[in-house]
Amino acid sequence: MTKRLMDFAESAALLLRYGIQAEGRQVYSITDAMSTADALGYPVVLKPVSEKIVHKSDEGVVFLNIKNAMQLQKACTIIEEKINGFSKGNKQGILVQGMAEKGFELLIGAKQDPGFGPVTMIGIGGIFVELYADAAMGIGILSTMDVERMLTKTQAGRVLEGFRGQRYDREEIIELAVNISRLMAENPDICELDLNPVIVYDKGCAIVDARLIRDENIVKPMAEDIKQWKLASIDAIFNAKSVAVIGASRPGTQGGVILKNCMKISNLYPVHPKLDKIHGLTCYPSLKDLPEVPEVAVFAVSSEKTVRIFEDFCKIGGKGAIIFSDGFAEMGRYDLEQKLVEISERYKVAFIGPNCMGVIDTFTGLNTNYIPEQRSVPVAKPNCVGVISQSGGIGLELLEMFSADNQNLGKWVSIGNAASVGVPELLAHMGDDPKIKIIAIYLEGVADGLKLMKIGREVAKRKPVLIIKGGTGGGAEAALSHTASLAGSHEAFKACCEQAGFYLVEELTEDPKIMVNVLSILTSQPKTANDRIAVISVGGGAGILLADQVTEEGMSLAEFSPETRKRMKALIEKNLKPEQRRHRATILRNVGNNPIDLFGNCDDERLLESIRIIDKDPNTDVIVAAIYLQVPLLSEYLPERLVELKGELTKPLIISPRGFSDYVDRCRAYMADKKLHTYTVPMMKPLSIAIEIWKKYGHSFLE
Ligand code: ADP
Ligand code: MG
């Protein structure tokens, strides 16, 4: 065990170097406790100082409101017993504090995260910290603004702002959190820190419990910069003019499929020791037999062979490699992976992989995916979406989901073991590529969090970066501090997303369609400036469910203008049958409210006309229409007419065709094919993310 709870005196001294005053004095005898109490003035508080007692209240040894020497003596005796005697040498003693007045109890904590370094946390404090679990994190040395942002994420922040009318010294707390983040950054051996509680008053605060834990073994993560030569290799891969496929073989083999998927590359060289020709291409026994030095090599051979031939490739002047081959770190062969890295660093030639599905570049035709097209989906024509996936399988699923929604993509990378090129490098590459306007990432572990955050911050200023994060569950760490138990690695990752400006699509673990729908909305709809949603439905229930989701996702329901209401009433009234006219007032009473129910006897004209009316409404930003295409008065031509109507509209139109019959599926497929965005599962989350993105970047992403 290298972790050690520091005693009060040591902790207080370190805190003081950062201008932070912890309450109390550490003493080692009842006499000293008594004289300290006299000096402070009663009432006082007594608690043990001992490495053995971490959560003092749990052990019943926090003595509050000690009023006189007799009470003090009694408390000291109990403490002495509990910690088996006082000893200055062993730092076993008593902490004597003044009794702080009541105020609001906050927790300010920090820990060293293995991927991100110092993470500082703020939230509601006291003895029920874990129960409230009210905490927001920030990574690195925080600015005042960072802490302000963290406070907006917590209940504690609302209390400090005066939720119940009291005033609290918010500025003092913000400064305290900033100083703690500095302390953590400058003292990487402090692995956990808890100030709990910090009692806040209208002026100032009292820190009555400071718990610092030191770990001599901690390794500080470095925010190393991205290496230029790696970016040069990635550039070479994505502009490949000549590609050698090492291990290209007959159809049905992995190398054979990769070769077939790369046939669009003009200078494509299969390398195989025995074969003469594959897929009509001349085969070469080795790299040195090729008519030119290939810029890029794709490896689909055993791990030992890969290492050997990769070195040859570097020697002859190759620029970048994709290592599909497996049998490296994922199989326990760290030695072989290390060799690859050494060769790569020596020759300054970076590689993607090993153990990856590599790259699909729809601009050049490079496609090292080893899945045969006939088992998956054809690679579509290029668009502005870049995908980086830490998992080949999820990468493949995203690819197929895109295709099912008739969406394209520009660049797709499966990074595998990411021994040489990881997410930060690829993010930097796609960030610099003007053809890529949106970046979607599937991420599991974050080994180089600081690097990711540093580059991500730059990229996210220019284009949206959406992240799906896997591995968010997992057991809580056994922790000495409250902070460590609340600030798990996923919380740190959330803070990274906040600070870098990434969009974290958390729900994807449940429904991968969220990410795909966000991309589909962005690339098929004009931008909007705001989030006022009009919900139109044929069949009221679906409209009500959608309207609920609109508000649940933090968007608002449009309040139609008087003119729009008038036009809607007129439209419905025009369609009333003679026998309905008697109930005119009742029928029309709710018409013009949002959500709009067009009734089960709705026909094409009524639906199309109401969409036109809402498109002109000055208080609406987006139109969502829930339609039962099954109802008899809607015609078979409605999907076609909706597609045509979309061309006239100025606002995004999202159709939610309700139901699951073959007929509905056919209509949905038709509309998706015509880039009229439909929701398979109607949900509003993707729309709310898309609107946030339009608001932040201020432009459309239409293809
Ligand atoms: P632990 O967290 O180890 O259980 P604390 O020192 O935080 O022990 O004490 C528990 C609770 O007692 C605090 O949350 C606070 O409400 C109260 N308390 C502790 N010290 C003082 C003090 N000096 N003045 C007033 N209240 C205190
Ligand atoms: Mg405490």
Image: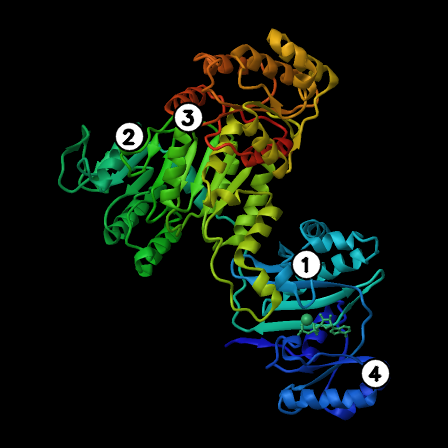
- Give amino acid for label 2: Asn
> Which disc is residue 123 wearing?
1
The residue carrying pointer 3 sits among few (fewer than 14), some (14 to 19) or many (20 or more) residues within 10 Å by Cα, namely: some
Look at discs 1 and 4 and give the one toward the viewer: 4
Q: CA distance from mark 3 to mark 1?
A: 45 Å
The residue carrying pointer 2 sits among few (fewer than 14), some (14 to 19) or many (20 or more) residues within 10 Å by Cα, namely: some
At horizontal 64% and vertical 38% (from top left) the residue drawn is 554
- Give amino acid for label 4: Lys
* Along the viewing direction, whichever of 150 and 508 lies nearer the viewer: 508
The answer to the question of whether label 2 and label 4 lie on touching residues, with beta carbons closer than 8 A, is no
Q: Compared with residue 499, is residue 127 higher up or lower down, i.e. above or below?
A: below
Q: Position of residue 503 (x, y in %)?
A: 56, 41
The answer to which of marks 3 and 1 sits earlier in the sequence is: 1
| Residue 500 appears left or right of 171 | left
Residue marked by disc 2: 267
Q: CA distance from mark 4 to mark 3?
A: 76 Å
Q: CA distance from mark 2 to mark 4?
A: 89 Å
Q: Compared with residue 398, is residue 43 higher up or lower down, i.e. above or below?
A: below
Residue marked by disc 3: 406
The local secondary structure at tag 1 comes to strand
Would residue 552 be seen by someone viewing this image from the given angle? yes
The answer to which of marks 4 and 3 sits earlier in the sequence is: 4
Q: CA distance from mark 2 to mark 3?
A: 30 Å
Q: Position of residue 417 (x, y in %)?
A: 37, 51
Residue marked by disc 4: 67
At horizontal 19% and vertical 30% (from top left) the residue drawn is 279
Would residue 229 be seen by someone viewing this image from the given angle? no
